[in-house]
Protein backbone atom coordinates (compact mmCIF):
# COMPACT_ATOMS: atom_id res chain seq x y z
CA UNK A 1 0.00 0.00 0.00
CA UNK A 2 2.82 2.41 0.90
CA UNK A 3 6.30 2.28 -0.62
CA UNK A 4 8.59 5.09 0.47
CA UNK A 5 12.30 5.42 -0.30
CA UNK A 6 14.73 8.19 0.68
CA UNK A 7 11.86 10.67 1.07
CA UNK A 8 12.72 14.23 2.07
CA UNK A 9 10.62 17.20 3.12
CA UNK A 10 12.20 20.65 3.43
CA UNK A 11 10.30 23.69 4.67
CA UNK A 12 11.52 27.22 4.00
CA UNK A 13 10.66 29.70 6.75
CA UNK A 14 9.96 33.42 6.26
CA UNK A 15 13.53 34.29 7.17
CA UNK A 16 14.77 31.99 4.37
CA UNK A 17 15.98 29.38 6.87
CA UNK A 18 15.38 25.82 5.68
CA UNK A 19 14.04 23.18 8.08
CA UNK A 20 14.47 19.51 7.12
CA UNK A 21 11.47 17.64 8.55
CA UNK A 22 12.17 14.33 6.76
CA UNK A 23 15.67 13.38 5.70
CA UNK A 24 15.84 10.16 3.72
CA UNK A 25 12.92 8.27 5.25
CA UNK A 26 12.23 4.66 4.15
CA UNK A 27 8.92 2.94 4.87
CA UNK A 28 6.85 0.02 3.57
CA UNK A 29 3.28 -0.74 4.65
CA UNK A 30 1.49 -3.82 3.35
CA UNK A 31 -2.11 -3.77 2.12
CA UNK A 32 -4.53 -4.57 4.92
CA UNK A 33 -1.99 -3.86 7.66
CA UNK A 34 -2.77 -2.11 10.96
CA UNK A 35 0.37 -0.38 12.14
CA UNK A 36 1.51 2.46 14.36
CA UNK A 37 4.05 5.25 14.01
CA UNK A 38 5.76 6.69 17.07
CA UNK A 39 8.30 9.44 17.61
CA UNK A 40 9.04 12.39 19.83
CA UNK A 41 7.90 15.92 19.05
CA UNK A 42 9.73 17.17 15.95
CA UNK A 43 10.69 13.68 14.76
CA UNK A 44 8.76 14.05 11.49
CA UNK A 45 5.83 11.69 12.14
CA UNK A 46 3.12 14.34 11.65
CA UNK A 47 4.85 15.58 8.48
CA UNK A 48 4.83 12.01 7.17
CA UNK A 49 1.13 11.63 7.94
CA UNK A 50 0.28 14.90 6.17
CA UNK A 51 2.21 13.79 3.08
CA UNK A 52 0.52 10.37 3.04
CA UNK A 53 -2.83 12.15 3.35
CA UNK A 54 -2.13 14.38 0.36
CA UNK A 55 -2.13 17.51 2.56
CA UNK A 56 1.50 18.23 1.71
CA UNK A 57 3.98 17.15 -0.95
CA UNK A 58 7.43 15.59 -0.46
CA UNK A 59 10.43 17.61 -1.60
CA UNK A 60 12.36 14.64 -3.01
CA UNK A 61 12.62 10.87 -2.98
CA UNK A 62 10.07 8.22 -3.92
CA UNK A 63 6.55 7.74 -2.53
CA UNK A 64 3.92 5.37 -3.93
CA UNK A 65 0.54 4.98 -2.19
CA UNK A 66 -1.79 2.36 -3.68
CA UNK A 67 0.27 2.58 -6.87
CA UNK A 68 -0.02 6.37 -7.13
CA UNK A 69 3.16 8.45 -7.32
CA UNK A 70 2.52 11.34 -4.93
CA UNK A 71 5.49 13.31 -6.24
CA UNK A 72 3.98 13.43 -9.73
CA UNK A 73 0.24 13.88 -9.12
CA UNK A 74 -1.29 17.04 -10.56
CA UNK A 75 -3.40 19.26 -8.28
CA UNK A 76 -6.58 17.78 -9.79
CA UNK A 77 -5.31 14.22 -9.29
CA UNK A 78 -4.34 15.05 -5.71
CA UNK A 79 -7.90 16.21 -4.95
CA UNK A 80 -9.21 12.92 -6.34
CA UNK A 81 -6.65 11.02 -4.25
CA UNK A 82 -7.86 12.75 -1.06
CA UNK A 83 -11.50 12.02 -1.91
CA UNK A 84 -11.14 8.39 -2.96
CA UNK A 85 -7.91 6.75 -1.80
CA UNK A 86 -7.27 8.08 1.70
CA UNK A 87 -9.33 8.88 4.80
CA UNK A 88 -8.13 11.00 7.73
CA UNK A 89 -8.98 11.03 11.45
CA UNK A 90 -7.68 14.09 13.30
CA UNK A 91 -6.76 14.28 16.98
CA UNK A 92 -8.78 17.48 17.40
CA UNK A 93 -12.45 16.53 17.10
CA UNK A 94 -13.31 20.07 16.02
CA UNK A 95 -11.48 19.29 12.76
CA UNK A 96 -13.42 16.05 12.29
CA UNK A 97 -17.01 17.14 12.92
CA UNK A 98 -19.08 20.20 12.03
CA UNK A 99 -20.98 21.20 15.21
CA UNK A 100 -24.20 22.29 13.47
CA UNK A 101 -24.63 18.91 11.71
CA UNK A 102 -25.84 15.66 13.22
CA UNK A 103 -23.55 12.62 13.34
CA UNK A 104 -25.12 11.04 10.27
CA UNK A 105 -24.95 14.35 8.35
CA UNK A 106 -21.25 14.64 9.21
CA UNK A 107 -20.64 11.16 7.76
CA UNK A 108 -22.66 12.06 4.65
CA UNK A 109 -20.63 15.22 3.97
CA UNK A 110 -17.60 13.53 2.29
CA UNK A 111 -20.06 11.55 0.15
CA UNK A 112 -21.70 14.81 -0.96
CA UNK A 113 -18.29 16.22 -1.93
CA UNK A 114 -17.72 13.12 -4.02
CA UNK A 115 -21.24 13.29 -5.48
CA UNK A 116 -22.42 9.95 -4.09
CA UNK A 117 -24.74 10.68 -1.19
CA UNK A 118 -26.20 7.61 0.57
CA UNK A 119 -27.97 7.95 3.93
CA UNK A 120 -28.09 4.15 4.32
CA UNK A 121 -24.31 3.86 3.94
CA UNK A 122 -23.72 6.62 6.51
CA UNK A 123 -25.95 4.85 9.05
CA UNK A 124 -24.19 1.53 8.31
CA UNK A 125 -20.79 3.09 9.05
CA UNK A 126 -22.05 4.59 12.31
CA UNK A 127 -23.32 1.17 13.35
CA UNK A 128 -19.95 -0.39 12.51
CA UNK A 129 -18.23 1.97 14.96
CA UNK A 130 -20.90 1.40 17.59
CA UNK A 131 -22.57 4.78 17.19
CA UNK A 132 -25.78 3.94 15.36
CA UNK A 133 -27.83 5.02 18.37
CA UNK A 134 -26.28 8.51 18.22
CA UNK A 135 -26.86 9.19 14.53
CA UNK A 136 -29.03 12.27 15.13
CA UNK A 137 -26.84 13.76 17.90
CA UNK A 138 -24.76 16.91 17.45
CA UNK A 139 -21.22 17.61 18.64
CA UNK A 140 -22.22 19.15 21.99
CA UNK A 141 -24.31 16.07 22.84
CA UNK A 142 -21.41 13.61 22.41
CA UNK A 143 -18.52 12.61 24.65
CA UNK A 144 -14.92 12.79 23.39
CA UNK A 145 -14.81 9.05 22.73
CA UNK A 146 -18.14 9.15 20.87
CA UNK A 147 -16.93 12.04 18.73
CA UNK A 148 -13.78 10.15 17.83
CA UNK A 149 -15.68 7.03 16.80
CA UNK A 150 -17.91 9.15 14.56
CA UNK A 151 -14.73 10.72 13.15
CA UNK A 152 -13.58 7.22 12.16
CA UNK A 153 -16.88 6.67 10.33
CA UNK A 154 -16.35 10.00 8.51
CA UNK A 155 -12.85 8.88 7.49
CA UNK A 156 -14.37 5.74 5.97
CA UNK A 157 -17.27 7.49 4.22
CA UNK A 158 -15.80 7.20 0.71
CA UNK A 159 -14.44 3.67 1.13
CA UNK A 160 -10.74 4.63 1.20
CA UNK A 161 -8.00 2.04 0.72
CA UNK A 162 -5.91 3.79 3.39
CA UNK A 163 -7.07 5.28 6.70
CA UNK A 164 -4.72 7.64 8.59
CA UNK A 165 -5.23 8.59 12.23
CA UNK A 166 -3.28 11.34 14.02
CA UNK A 167 -3.21 10.68 17.80
CA UNK A 168 -6.83 9.40 17.77
CA UNK A 169 -6.73 8.62 21.52
CA UNK A 170 -4.82 11.72 22.62
CA UNK A 171 -7.79 13.40 24.33
CA UNK A 172 -9.57 10.43 25.93
CA UNK A 173 -9.02 8.20 28.96
CA UNK A 174 -7.42 4.75 28.86
CA UNK A 175 -10.70 2.81 28.81
CA UNK A 176 -12.05 4.89 25.91
CA UNK A 177 -8.70 4.58 24.10
CA UNK A 178 -9.03 0.79 24.26
CA UNK A 179 -12.52 1.01 22.76
CA UNK A 180 -11.28 3.23 19.92
CA UNK A 181 -8.38 0.89 19.11
CA UNK A 182 -10.79 -2.08 19.12
CA UNK A 183 -12.89 -0.18 16.55
CA UNK A 184 -9.81 0.26 14.35
CA UNK A 185 -8.92 -3.45 14.66
CA UNK A 186 -12.48 -4.54 13.82
CA UNK A 187 -12.66 -2.27 10.76
CA UNK A 188 -9.23 -3.43 9.65
CA UNK A 189 -10.36 -7.07 9.80
CA UNK A 190 -13.86 -6.60 8.36
CA UNK A 191 -13.13 -4.11 5.58
CA UNK A 192 -9.48 -4.98 4.85
CA UNK A 193 -8.61 -1.27 4.93
CA UNK A 194 -4.97 -0.37 5.61
CA UNK A 195 -4.71 1.70 8.81
CA UNK A 196 -1.74 3.80 9.93
CA UNK A 197 -1.98 5.38 13.40
CA UNK A 198 0.38 8.00 14.82
CA UNK A 199 0.41 7.59 18.60
CA UNK A 200 2.46 8.32 21.70
CA UNK A 201 0.31 5.99 23.81
CA UNK A 202 2.56 3.05 24.78
CA UNK A 203 -0.45 0.95 25.80
CA UNK A 204 -1.97 1.21 22.32
CA UNK A 205 1.45 0.58 20.79
CA UNK A 206 1.68 -2.77 22.57
CA UNK A 207 -1.58 -3.91 20.97
CA UNK A 208 -0.38 -3.43 17.39
CA UNK A 209 1.48 -6.05 15.40
CA UNK A 210 4.01 -3.57 14.03
CA UNK A 211 5.13 -0.12 15.13
CA UNK A 212 7.64 2.04 13.25
CA UNK A 213 9.73 4.51 15.26
CA UNK A 214 10.87 7.73 13.57
CA UNK A 215 13.73 9.83 14.88
CA UNK A 216 15.24 12.95 13.29
CA UNK A 217 13.21 12.50 10.11
CA UNK A 218 14.28 8.90 9.49
CA UNK A 219 12.92 5.45 10.26
CA UNK A 220 15.07 4.34 13.19
CA UNK A 221 13.51 1.06 14.34
CA UNK A 222 10.56 -1.31 14.06
CA UNK A 223 8.79 -2.92 16.98
CA UNK A 224 7.24 -6.28 16.08
CA UNK A 225 4.91 -8.49 18.07
CA UNK A 226 6.99 -11.48 19.17
CA UNK A 227 4.58 -13.99 17.60
CA UNK A 228 5.13 -12.43 14.17
CA UNK A 229 8.86 -12.10 14.85
CA UNK A 230 9.01 -15.83 15.61
CA UNK A 231 7.20 -16.73 12.40
CA UNK A 232 9.42 -14.52 10.23
CA UNK A 233 12.79 -15.19 11.83
CA UNK A 234 12.16 -18.62 13.44
CA UNK A 235 13.33 -17.34 16.82
CA UNK A 236 12.90 -19.78 19.72
CA UNK A 237 11.51 -18.20 22.91
CA UNK A 238 10.32 -19.97 26.04
CA UNK A 239 6.93 -19.10 27.55
CA UNK A 240 8.37 -16.95 30.35
CA UNK A 241 10.16 -14.70 27.86
CA UNK A 242 7.04 -14.31 25.74
CA UNK A 243 4.95 -13.36 28.78
CA UNK A 244 7.49 -10.84 30.07
CA UNK A 245 7.84 -9.00 26.75
CA UNK A 246 5.25 -9.11 23.98
CA UNK A 247 7.27 -7.11 21.42
CA UNK A 248 10.84 -7.01 20.15
CA UNK A 249 12.54 -3.91 18.71
CA UNK A 250 14.61 -4.13 15.51
CA UNK A 251 16.87 -1.34 14.27
CA UNK A 252 16.32 -0.32 10.63
CA UNK A 253 19.08 -0.16 8.03
CA UNK A 254 18.52 2.42 5.31
CA UNK A 255 19.41 1.90 1.65
CA UNK A 256 22.98 3.10 2.31
CA UNK A 257 23.48 0.70 5.22
CA UNK A 258 23.16 3.41 7.88
CA UNK A 259 21.60 2.75 11.28
CA UNK A 260 20.43 4.98 14.13
CA UNK A 261 21.70 3.88 17.54
CA UNK A 262 19.40 4.71 20.49
CA UNK A 263 20.83 7.41 22.74
CA UNK A 264 20.69 5.29 25.91
CA UNK A 265 22.73 2.56 24.18
CA UNK A 266 25.46 5.06 23.28
CA UNK A 267 25.46 6.51 26.79
CA UNK A 268 25.82 2.97 28.11
CA UNK A 269 29.29 2.69 26.50
CA UNK A 270 30.32 6.23 27.48
CA UNK A 271 29.60 7.86 24.10
CA UNK A 272 28.11 11.06 25.57
CA UNK A 273 30.53 13.50 23.87
CA UNK A 274 31.98 11.26 21.14
CA UNK A 275 30.87 11.46 17.49
CA UNK A 276 32.88 8.46 16.19
CA UNK A 277 32.60 4.79 17.03
CA UNK A 278 34.79 1.72 16.48
CA UNK A 279 33.09 -1.03 14.46
CA UNK A 280 34.49 -4.55 14.74
CA UNK A 281 33.40 -7.97 13.54
CA UNK A 282 33.64 -10.49 16.36
CA UNK A 283 32.52 -14.11 15.91
CA UNK A 284 29.86 -13.25 13.34
CA UNK A 285 28.58 -10.21 15.25
CA UNK A 286 28.99 -6.50 14.57
CA UNK A 287 30.24 -4.80 17.75
CA UNK A 288 30.29 -1.05 18.42
CA UNK A 289 32.92 0.28 20.81
CA UNK A 290 33.89 3.63 22.27
CA UNK A 291 37.16 4.53 20.47
CA UNK A 292 38.40 6.57 23.47
CA UNK A 293 38.32 3.49 25.72
CA UNK A 294 40.52 1.62 23.22
CA UNK A 295 43.03 4.49 23.17
CA UNK A 296 43.12 4.57 26.97
CA UNK A 297 43.75 0.81 27.12
CA UNK A 298 46.64 1.12 24.68
Image: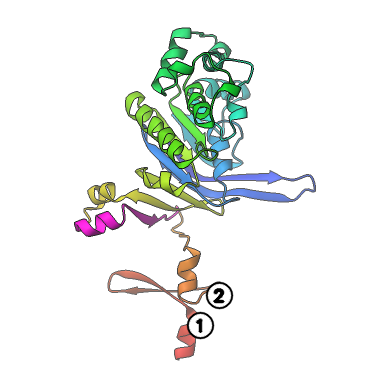
Q: Position of residue 270 (x, y in %)?
A: 49, 77
Instruction: Residue at 38%, 27% (x, y): give it.
Output: 187
Q: Does 263 sit above or below residue 45?
A: below
Report the disc number at residue 138.
none
The reply to whether callout 1 and callout 2 are in contact (CB within 8 Å) is yes
Rendered-image quadrant of the C terminus: bottom left
Q: Secondary structure at mark 2?
A: loop
Q: Position of residue 227 (x, y in %)?
A: 26, 48
Rendered-image quadrant of the N terminus: top left
Q: Secondary structure at mark 1?
A: helix
What residue sits right under mark 2 in the picture? 274
Q: Residue furthest front?
A: 141
What residue sits right under mark 1 in the picture? 292
Q: How is the image coloured?
A: rainbow
Residue 237 in magenta stretch: yes
Residue 16 in magenta stretch: no
Instruction: Residue at 37%, 72% (x, y): give it.
Output: 287
Instruction: Residue at 58%, 14% (x, y): give it.
Output: 113
Q: Position of residue 58 (x, y in %)?
A: 59, 39
Q: Residue furthest right?
A: 15
Look at the image and tell me whether residue 67 can be seen.
no
Look at the image and tell me whether residue 20 can be seen.
yes
Amino acid sequence: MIHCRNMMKIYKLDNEIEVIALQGLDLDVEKGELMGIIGSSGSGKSTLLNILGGLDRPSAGKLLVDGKDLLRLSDKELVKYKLETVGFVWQNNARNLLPYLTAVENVELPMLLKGRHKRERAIELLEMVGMGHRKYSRLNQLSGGEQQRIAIAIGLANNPRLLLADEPTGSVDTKTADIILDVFRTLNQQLGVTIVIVTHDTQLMKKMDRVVAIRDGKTSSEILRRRIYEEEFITQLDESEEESESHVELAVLDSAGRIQIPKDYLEGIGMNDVNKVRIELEEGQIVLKNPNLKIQEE
